[in-house]
């Protein structure tokens, strides 16, 4: 597989990444939450220093797009005034934390996310930049399909567990033990060859035969997995979706005005605290049956330098034709950044058109090659087997 570059790192507010529409700066909201004032401030800065477009990533982070090199330092300083930037790049990179959004004040998820974030800031671990943690302590797990290397979760029989990604069971812990155990697991990963083996992620390290020490292994099974959340009211607020995980600065201002805080999610949705009514805005996905929820697309060309094709316009046109219960991923290249895992149908941009993968990821062997994007809409029914 060739034709794209795997960078091995992610952008941050202190380490921007060049894309086709300028530099991208990534913001990692603390414990996955922004106050309304912080969200409004980000929207203002995206318009002042960028092109006004903001991404919500699969790691529940925000990205300001279209930033010019000469204004990066000023933007980072403005974000720091909002409390959104760490003191140095190493601390910023290590604060790679995914938090289940359906928490209530003082519960295990909120308490442990705060404690873990503080511990990560105080404990340099030398982890790879893509190495991450998840805190997911509701009665059902909502982050099971999201990428994370160390997970603090609810056990099937109650209580808490710390689990290495790739291990089917975790170590039962008391609340006060969870964060120290997670850090010990991270240190074991680093000292047992998890970094030097070239993978840099926990699950491949476990799969390759790395054996957890007895003090960190366990026999506690994690809780059941929650069905994928849908837009609409939930216990702590309302979920609103974003087509392809992107919104304009004015849209973020609109969302920020709907509640006291916004919680980011890995599903290209934002949970607005306290929201009970469906907001009316043409850039928000607010209904569970919206066809846009059945498609995923990356930035694509020309916004991404690696992409061979425009993606989102095509995905939006195909969305109404994707069968209920199925999912379509349109990827500008074989990296599959927007959805690394499998989909029912995946279209992969190449220099010779789109390749079609069935029930696989963008890196799998395609069933068809070189499809003409101009003909895909007309032929899509036949490709999906819908007719």
Image: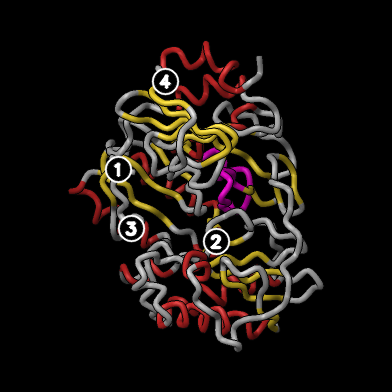
Q: Position of residue 172 (x, y in %)?
A: 70, 80
Q: Is residue 188 above or below residue 150?
A: below
Colouring scheme, one of rainbow, by chain, secondary structure, one colour: secondary structure
Q: Label 1 to label 4, Cα distance in Å?
A: 19 Å
Q: Would you say residue 92 is visible in this rendering?
A: no
Disc 4: which residue = 371
| Lateral position of residue 232 relative to residue 207, left or right | right
> Image quadrant for the C terminus?
top right
What residue is shown at x 37% (from left), y 61% (from top)? 81
Secondary structure category for the residue under label 1: loop
Sequence-first disc among 1 and 2: 1
Q: Nearer the viewer, residue 376 or 74?
A: 376
Sequence-first disc among 1 and 3: 1
Sequence-first disc among 4 and 2: 2
Disc 1: which residue = 2
Total numbered badges shown on the rendered structure: 4
Q: Label 1 to label 3, Cα distance in Å?
A: 16 Å
Disc 2: which residue = 98
| Lateral position of residue 10 relative to residue 205, left or right | left
Identify the disc placed on residue 187.
none
Q: Nearer the viewer, residue 326 or 275?
A: 326
Q: Position of residue 1 (x, y in %)?
A: 34, 43
Q: Position of residue 115 (x, y in %)?
A: 56, 77
């Amino acid at each position: 597989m060739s034709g794209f570059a795997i960078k091995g790192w992610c952008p941050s507010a202190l380490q921007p990444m060049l894309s086709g529409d300028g530099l991208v700066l990534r913001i990692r909201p603390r414990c996955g939450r922004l106050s309304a004032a912080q969200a409004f401030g980000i929207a203002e800065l995206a318009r002042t220093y960028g092109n006004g477009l903001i991404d919500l990533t699969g790691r529940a982070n925000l990205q300001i797009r279209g930033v010019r090199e000469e204004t990066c330092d000023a933007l980072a300083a403005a974000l720091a005034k909002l409390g959104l930037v760490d003191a140095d790049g190493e601390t910023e990179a290590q604060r790679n934390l995914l938090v289940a959004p359906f928490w209530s004040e003082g519960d295990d998820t909120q308490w442990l996310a705060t404690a873990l974030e503080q511990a990560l800031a105080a404990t340099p671990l030398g982890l790879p930049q893509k190495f991450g943690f998840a805190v997911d302590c509701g009665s059902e797990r909502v982050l099971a399909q999201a990428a994370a290397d160390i997970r603090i979760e609810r056990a099937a029989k109650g209580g808490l567990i710390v689990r290495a990604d790739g291990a089917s069971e975790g170590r039962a812990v008391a609340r006060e033990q969870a964060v120290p155990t997670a850090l010990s697991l991270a240190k074991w990963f680093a000292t047992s060859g998890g970094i030097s083996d070239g993978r840099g992620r926990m699950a491949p390290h476990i799969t390759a035969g790395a054996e957890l020490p007895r003090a960190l292994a366990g026999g506690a099974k994690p809780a059941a997995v929650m069905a994928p959340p849908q837009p609409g009211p939930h216990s702590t607020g309302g979920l609103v979706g974003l087509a392809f995980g992107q919104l304009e600065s004015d849209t973020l201002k609109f969302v920020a005005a709907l509640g006291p805080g916004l919680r980011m999610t890995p599903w290209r949705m934002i949970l607005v605290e306290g929201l009970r009514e469906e907001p009316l805005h043409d850039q928000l996905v607010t209904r569970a049956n919206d066809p846009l929820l059945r498609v995923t697309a990356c930035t694509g060309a020309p916004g991404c330098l690696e992409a061979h094709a425009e993606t989102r316009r095509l995905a939006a046109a195909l969305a109404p034709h994707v069968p209920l219960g199925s999912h379509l991923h349109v990827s500008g290249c074989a990296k599959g950044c927007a959805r690394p895992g499998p989909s029912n149908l995946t279209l992969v941009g190449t220099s010779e058109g789109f390749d079609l993968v069935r029930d696989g990821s963008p890196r799998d062997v395609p069933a068809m090659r070189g499809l003409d994007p101009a003909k895909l809409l007309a032929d899509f029914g036949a490709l999906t087997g819908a007719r």
